[in-house]
Amino acid sequence: MKLTKDGIKDTSLWEAKGYSLPQFDREKTAKATHEKPFWVHFGAGNIFRAFQANVVQELLNKGILDRGLIVAEGYDYEIIEKMYRPHDNIGALVTLKSSGTVEKTVVGSIMESLVADSSNEKDWARLLEIFRSPSLQMVTFTITEKGYLLKNASGVFAAGVEDDFASGPVLPKSYIGKVVTLLHERYINGELPVAFVSMDNCSHNGDKLFAAVNEFASEWEKRGVCKQGFLAYINDKAKVSFPWTMIDKITPRPDGKIEKILCDDGIEELSPFITSKKTYVAPFVNAEECQYLVIEDSFPNGRPALEKAGLYFTDRATVDKVEKMKVCTCLNPLHTFLAVSGCLLGYTLIADEMKDEDLLRLVKRLGYDEGLKVVVDPKIIQPKDFIDEVVNIRIPNPFMPDTPQRIACDTSQKLSIRFGETIKGYLSRSDLHISDLKVIPLVFALWLRYLMAINDKGEPFELSPDPLLEECKKYVAGISLGSSDISAIEPLLCREDIFGVNLVKTGLSDSVKAYFRSLITKTGAVRATIQSI
């Protein structure tokens, strides 16, 4: 049994092992896709293979679509050369269910895989051909938020960007330069319409993609290195759109336990490998069962009926509301509480924390009691139903190898949006009282206790990466277990950039300090404090 076009021909063998297979004619679909491509995706990583590719397979199986996907990778070409092509673009998706079972799918909806490298003559020529095609409706991206940045935090341009600015849409080197060059090809071949859709997990992702594309077009027109009118073309929403989306699905890196399940079924050549750019890839992906993709319905050249596979199409304001619901109330705040408390209590799996009655009680109190009172309700998804799924299915999933240490990364950047907006919601309501918040100030106190890098047993542990880590550690540097003077933390509690509000002015600082005093009394104080609430 092999994940190749010939290797999956014996359908009865695969089905006997419990695999769902492509139910469409791949050869016919590949021909139609080549002739009239409709969807190109940049970013050949796990989320694409587990989510978008599987959605397209579902629609192909139902006969709703007659063409498949084309994937292009503009950063790590080895993913295409050493993983996609040897397997004829076929992969296995293992869906990890909270019940402890798995669902196994052979995904064959990707018809072409291309290296987005302008020095690769064959693949680059094919990409140019695709972008000249009137049938192309959408170009989507999962290239991470960093992929849209033309400069780093120090203001230094990313590799290739300045050269691409100077040379124009000819043999680009940078990722965005490649993408904009391909869009320019579409412009000079009839100003053809298309949607550029970021599906990365970041706020207002369409604006981030537009800003990068717009900067390139502006520079090129200013320098006279592209066809005039290109800038107006990408700013014409009737020609090129940059919809906002909200995506939510956890796809950890391929797990050894899942590889063993597939190997035991008799599948060969599954070994993962690490590319020279440190990408961990395998012929299979593992992912949670729950997934959401909410998309602003702005497609100048039409779009496929993805809603028939469970995706949501709506207006921009609703996409924003769904994101706020998830980030400010229903998922991310719960994760942050579990992250900092889990590190202090010695947990290494988020799922295991949900078996802890003390933590589970406060997770529910944080979401249902404190958050839902001021939640942003997008209407298309019910906030309580979303939390129910998070608390009962997603976080407790024993198969998901997510860790509190990973989620604790960049906590200083997360507190403002994950908790500050709820505090503001309470302050804006005459029927709610800030003093009713108990778990949110506890989270802040737990984070301060976390910064001490001493767990509840009194043992040192390694703090997760955070851009403000060294700065924030200074506020607790002189505090140890048993300290009575905690005045050093007071300036930190005033920082709106971290907490979203000035905790002193809002009246929450006294609660935070009281919890912090309790948390540092002695070893075991973290557990005792959590139990006392």
Image (tube, rainbow, N blue to C red):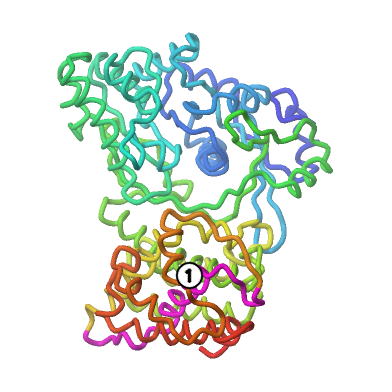
Is 516 colored magenta in this rendering? no
Q: Is residue 146 left or right of residue 321?
A: right
Q: Quick one: 108 or 520, which is closer to the camera?
A: 520
Q: Quick one: 33 or 146, which is closer to the camera?
A: 146
Q: Quick one: 349 or 154, which is closer to the camera?
A: 154
Residue 490, image quadrant? bottom left
Eyeballing the image, is 270 above or below 475?
above
Spot the residue most to the front: 478
Q: Is residue 476 left or right of residue 405?
A: left
Is 457 colored magenta in this rendering? yes
At 31% across and 60% down in the image, what residue appears?
Answer: 321
Mark 1 nearby-residue class (10 Å; few <14, some 14–19, many ≥20) = few
Spot the residue most to the top: 121
Q: Amino acid at mark 1?
A: Ala
How far across and down, in percent of the image, does residue 504 sit? Answer: 29, 80
How far across and down, in percent of the image, does residue 325 sit? Answer: 37, 64
Q: Quick one: 191 or 12, which is closer to the camera?
A: 191
Residue 99, image quadrant? bottom right
The region drawn magenta spans 430-458
Residue on which the image places disc 1: 477
